[in-house]
Image (cartoon, rainbow, N blue to C red):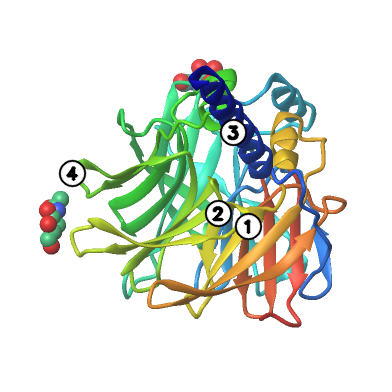
Amino acid sequence: MIKKAITVVIVLLIIHFILKFLHGLDLFKHVYNHTPGPCRIVPGQGIGYEDMETLPNGLTLITSGLVIPTTSPTVCEYRKKHNGKGRIYLFDFNKPEKGIEELTIVGDQFNQSDFGPHGISLYKWKDQDKVTVMVVNHGSTGDTIEKFLFIAKDKQLKHVHTYRDPSIHFVNDVAMDSENSFYFTNSAYSRNQLLSVLEISIPLAYANLIYYDGRAYHKQYDGFVLINGLILSHDQKYLYTGETIPQRFHTFTRQKNGTLSRYQEFNAKTALDNPTLDKDGNVLVGSHPILWQLMAHLDNPETPASSQVIKLHMKDGVVTKMTEVFSDNGHTLYGSSVASLYKDAMLVGTVYHKLMYCEVRYID
Ligand SMILES: *[C@@H]1O[C@H](CO)[C@@H](O)[C@H](O)[C@H]1NC(C)=O
Ligand SMILES: *[C@@H]1O[C@H](CO)[C@@H](O)[C@H](O)[C@H]1NC(C)=O
């Protein structure tokens, strides 16, 4: 009798695990298409425009040529075939017809042929024109965070410093709160492709969120399965980040010394990638509405995956409403990872695919 009961419980647990797993992959979800106005692909030779950030004057810096440590051989071939390499592009929202332009990187300490850019953060110095840029780099000797000065008139990035530390392990994104202090997310632990699939399937929660205060690295929170991009609110009172698995958005309150406290957890029901802010402080997130498509796309970039941009309406660090700004079933734009809004226009970037520019006629 007891044996029978135990068997039933085990079978139910297995069924529960399988259903949860399939549900988590968005197996039963469907995506429709809509845009906020006319959209077009921005011509360019980059493969992927994974992350971006826009300055108050409309200049936007975009990372391209992502190679994650767990990249499949198919992705490496795709990269070779398309002459893929690490680049930072510039886009000016005031002159959208000019398209994108590659920034020149200068500095002897920086090896450009070993550049695998991922997340990006911009910090505009108070009362000055100076802009510091930080970029997550998956290099051949491990992950680093690279610091540059953006010289707009020369279309240059001047390399300033490389941050290297055991806690900079498998970094996804960075968010500066001053020119020498920043938050970053380690999106997983395992840097091996097979083990990383196991890590997120079981799932083990080895991802974390760390703060560097200019002197030392302080772990803020851990126990995430796959934490992704992050950004600070305009007033730096809050830090926002999204998890790709499970599909949750987090708000943290930030103290003056950088320490974070959990504030709100919002179930977005879509796999979140990178957040940006609009001028009113609302959060735009490039996201992946159907996770299994993203998985297939990450394995082979020629496989389409649907795209989505959501807007999280924020009030005092709390999500009050979520609306969808853009949605594509994967026929036009594969795997959207970020979006940036400036006046009446929006750019949407992708992990391994193209860059899209949309006129924004209506946004809720
Ligand atoms: C730069 O990186 C490439 C690719 O990893 C490597 O082959 C080369 O030796 C590096 N150069 C220097 C000066 O470290
Ligand atoms: C930051 O300040 C809070 C109190 O405001 C304190 O509890 C915490 O220990 C401080 N953290 C560090 C790293 O100094």
Residue at 49%, 51% (x, y): give it.
229
Question: Is there CB contact under 8 Å for labels 1 and 2?
Answer: yes
> Mark 1 or mark 3, which is nearer the start of the sequence?
3
- Judged by depth in the image, the label closer to the viewer, 3 or 2, is 3
Q: Amino acid at mark 4?
A: Arg
Q: Which residue is mark 4?
A: 215
- Judged by depth in the image, the label closer to the viewer, 3 or 1, is 3
Q: Which residue is mark 1?
A: 286
Using the image as rendered, state which of residue 99 and residue 195 is in the foreground: 195
* Among the 4 quarters of the image, the one containing residue 328: bottom right
On the image, the x and y values in percent for residue 69 come to 54, 26
Q: Which residue is mark 3?
A: 17
Mark 1 to mark 2 CA distance (whole Å): 6 Å
Please indicate whether residue 73 sits to the left or right of residue 264 in the image: right
On the image, the x and y values in percent for residue 285 come to 59, 61
On the image, the x and y values in percent for residue 260 come to 27, 57
Q: What mark, if any, has residue 274 been given in the picture?
A: 2
Give the secondary structure at mark 4. loop
Give the secondary structure at mark 2. strand
Mark 3 to mark 2 CA distance (whole Å): 28 Å
Question: Is there CB contact under 8 Å for labels 3 and 4?
Answer: no
351 shown above or below 201: below
- Judged by depth in the image, the label closer to the viewer, 3 or 4, is 3
Residue at 75%, 41% (x, y): give it.
293
On the image, the x and y values in percent for residue 203 come to 50, 32
**Figure label count:** 4
